Amino acid sequence: MRFELHMALRFLKEGRMQTALILAGISTGVGVIIFISALIGGLQESIIDRTLGTQAHVVLQPPEEEARPQLDRERETVLEHIQRPAQRLRSILGWPQLLAELRRRPEVTAASPTVAGSAFALRGTANRSVALRGVDPESYSGILDLRTKLTEGAFDLTGTHIVVGVELAKELGLSVGDTLRLTAPEDRSEVFTISGLFDVGNKDLNLRWVFVSLREGQTMMNLSGGVSTVEVKVRDIFSAEKEAREIRAATGLKTDSWMTLNSELLIGLRGQNSSSVMIQFFVIIAVMLGIASVLVVSVIQKGRQIGILRAFGTRREQVLRIFLLQGGLLGVVGSLGGILLGTFLALFFQSMVSNQDGTPTFPVALTAALYARSVLIALLTGVVGAWLPARRAANLDPAVAIRYE
Amino acid sequence: MNNSATILHLRHVRKSYPGAVSTEVLHGIDISIAQGEFVALVGPSGSGKSTLLNILGLLDRPTSGSVEILGQDCTRLDDAGLTRLRGQSLGFVFQFHHLLPSFTAEENVFLPMQASVGHFTPDMRNRARDLLARIGLEGFETRPVFRLSGGQQQRVAIARALIMNPALVLADEPTGNLDRASGQQAFEFMQQFNRELGTAFLLVTHDPTLAKRCDRILTLEDGYLANGEQTT
């Protein structure tokens, strides 16, 4: 065994009570960090899942049409007032190539072409305004897997089959196998057969969304062979804006990430992150001061032993390492206790309250990365906390230490 | 002094402590100790023995003068150099043994060697056990030192001082805290090692009987060597 490790372990063993108390302190601190992180992480995952579960992370659309001002010969604007043109539903040019390029991007997990527009759903004398979504079922499952959201029927969009939300079905008295007329702009109209009902957990979407095949969507929206949007999902949701910017720069298309479309949510998530970081910061400071104070006392108590070691040829840097190792060992061992404590607290808290569907009201996110980060933080905190006592020990004058201690 | 090689040479060593009025504790000390010598250093309390011992042990620096150990001018060495030389060439025995209480007898003995090498090897334990056996502590190797008697603890301290095969052992009243029999035994073990290993000893003692049994007696009074090569 290394000399420094041998001495560090012995010194910790000698001060059993102090070691036990500071280990309890570190465990509590790390436990709090794990508990808070798991709770906030779980809540964020839940919020993100509920909010973004039905959304693409990045939506690509054709660039907006802009009015071109009339210029005179000197290329100066002639008209003083330029009216913005109304945005027509247009297709993304070269969308099959675009899809292929998007799918090659390492951060992109799914990309799906869609045709999205407004229509009216008519059943007898009742009608409702709906959002028609023409999708390719296979690739769209990477954006939103509607098969898992079905309450009735099947996700079948072949021919004139459509899938509608449970709220629309309730409003219009629809069930699987019934027919429904959809009327799009320019009086394009078609009768469809309901193949399935979905519930995406959002009443408004359950009322408005109507899914048809991509081909039917193109026909209804008079976008033959074209798509109005390409929807993209990315690996790390917080990289969506960066991806959107890069895709915009590369393609010239209009790109919107969920982060710009849900800026309030993003502010909320960042606020939660900031409060979590603040709590962790103060816990780390408290743990660091605890380790430092215990080791300062240890240096005072073991001054003579340090003096003897120095007299027998132990180098200053060896003494420094003995105390830094003690700090590191306290941090690592304390963090293991903290992992147990934090995990217990988090799971206990999670099990206390449940939603009606049985899912926990306060889900917690206990991950290997969280544990690894906690151990690393505790190790660094221990070493940093031990730095000043270690320096003090290393700088002890052996003659003075032996004479007066 | 015999004709063997000189292992320690002090020349005109002065030591003063700064303060409102600077206090000089050692006034130009000259000492030479040869290999294998057994030298006693005597003197009343406050005569400067501890200060001199600290300078000889490279735990303190003289205000002026030079300290040579094994031909090396120690006044030119930095802290790391002094530590290295101290670990390799000098051994210490203190009045209150100063063993590490939670360590076993053999661990206390091989610690200086472990510190020097940086890690433990089985050879260190063997050497520690050999020394403990030679000093009459066979069977006590794995016993924590706080469970040993005062005499046994001091013998462990003697073994520890010898583990690195030092050229010189500085013993600061090693028998001062022991009963007469234990003190006598500790002294005899030191003499035994002096004879068998050729290790030089400088023994600080208040016991005139023990001092007379040494090769040479140095007497320090008020910071002056009464019978050494003293300069003023």
Image (cartoon, coloured by chain):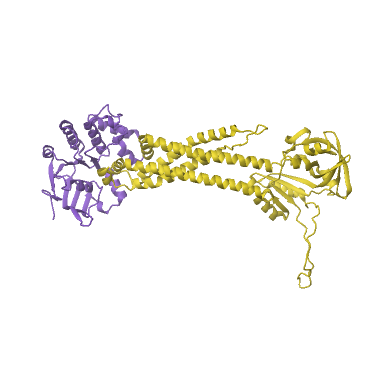
Q: Nearer the viewer, residue A120 or B91?
A: A120
Question: What colour denotes chain A?
Answer: yellow
Q: Residue A124: give x, y in percent of width and height.
A: 89, 39
Q: Quarter of the image for the C terminus of chain A: give it.
A: top left
Quarter-of-image position of residue B65: bottom left
Residue A95 screen position, x and y as percent: 77, 49
Horizontally, residue A398 falls left or right of residue A260, namely left
Residue situated in front as seen by the camera: A18 or B189: A18
Left or right: A151 with respect to A17? right
Q: Does residue A159 appear to the left or right of A260 in the view shown?
A: right
Q: Is residue A384 above or below residue A81?
A: above
User: Where does the N terminus of chain A fall, quadrant-wise?
Assistant: top left
Residue in the picture at 30% in, 49% down: B81
The quarter holding residue A234 reads top right
Estimate the x, y position of residue A111 in percent, counting from the top left. 72, 45
- Residue B211 position in % (x across, y down): 12, 40
Q: Nearer the viewer, residue A101 or A292?
A: A292
Q: Colour of chain B?
A: purple
Residue A111 seen in this snapshot: yes
Q: Quadrant of residue B143?
A: top left
**Residue sitting farthest toward the bottom:** A74
The residue positioned farthest toward the top in the image shown? B139
From the viewer's perspective, is A70 left or right of B5? right
Q: Is residue B13 visible?
A: no
